[in-house]
Image (tube, rainbow, N blue to C red):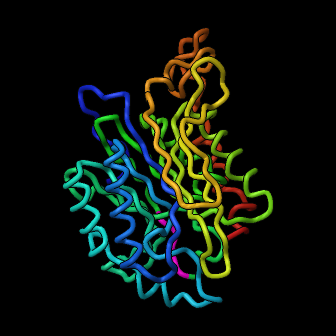
Amino acid sequence: MTGKADKPMTYKDEVAVAAVNFHAAWGEKAANLARILAQAGEAADRGAQIVLFPELALTGYNHDKGSIAMQQRDAEPVPGPATDALAAHSRERGIWIVVGLPERDEATGTLYNSAVVTGPEGLVGCYRKIHPAGKESLWCAKGEAPLLFDTPWGPVGVGICLDTYRFPELVRYHAAQGARLYLNPTALPLVPDWEALYYTTLNARVLENSVFVASANLVGEDRDVSFPGGSMIIGPGTETPKPLVHAGPVEGEEAMVIATIDLADGARLRGWLPLTAPNRVTGVPDWRPAVYSRLLGDVLASPNWRNSR
């Protein structure tokens, strides 16, 4: 499903969300899937209704010294064997599960860095990362469409890693379409000052959009790359603009963080209006998508943009 989710009559506000620091065994898809299913079951036992795993948790993240043989071998269609197992587990436990995996388009053979969503009724959708990072582009193509899926708590948006940290447009799109919760499966490595990129930008997305953000990162060794974890659940403050941490972050070890959050808190901000709410003085929203659309048209028409491609 892409675009805006169909809106039911009413939405629930309180939802229990789990985000998992997951150590993916590189290239061991079957073992990783078994552990994902077990941990999703544990999350359900602990009351979680939405369970988020990291980017490429199904296979591990890294390429092998420039070789993309693992990604080519282990990429799956959606639906496929892994998503069938996840969908069956979601139906059995009555939960939503979000897992990163390499996806193969059956029609074209093109590979994507994707996140699959399953729910109580089975397969919900699959998001293809719009902004692959660095050497991911050795093996995957760019996705073209957002994924916004409907739940009893309203539409929920999904973005993957760099989509969230460097391109705030995607989170804003989801918020403008009514999402109060944004999910960030990520594979942010342990590099110098990774905390500045990770924590600073996640807090910024909350401040900008009055949405809750759940982020799940890989942890441990992955070929020649290490991942720090840091999975967490944050949301808008109700007394000040400062975002509130509802669970986590946990760094350096496998862990699961769970929080029951009240999505209505985004609309209770004092002095900070939700994205599409009327300004208290003018009576119209401050956000101006028609203006930005014209500005983007100018960018696309400019020689600077044409010459950069």
Residue 160 visible? The answer is no
The residue at the point 36 percent across, 76 percent down is 105
- Most extreme residue toward the top, as rendered? 281
Percent x, y of residue 18: 44, 47
Percent x, y of residue 14: 37, 30
Describe residue 30's horizontal placement relative to residue 170 as left or right: left
Residues in magenta?
Answer: 139-143
Give whichever of 307, 183 is nearer the camera.
183
Percent x, y of residue 63: 59, 82
Describe residue 215's horizontal placement relative to residue 199 as left or right: left
- Most extreme residue toward the right, as rendered? 192
On-image quarter of the N terminus = bottom left
Q: Quadrant of residue 289?
A: top right
The residue at the point 61 percent across, 40 percent down is 205
Placement of 257 over or under 219, stated as above or below? above
Percent x, y of residue 170: 54, 48
User: Is 258 inside the magenta-drawn segment?
Assistant: no
On-image quarter of the C terminus = bottom right
The residue at the point 75 percent across, 61 percent down is 304
Placement of 118 over or under 276, stated as above or below? below
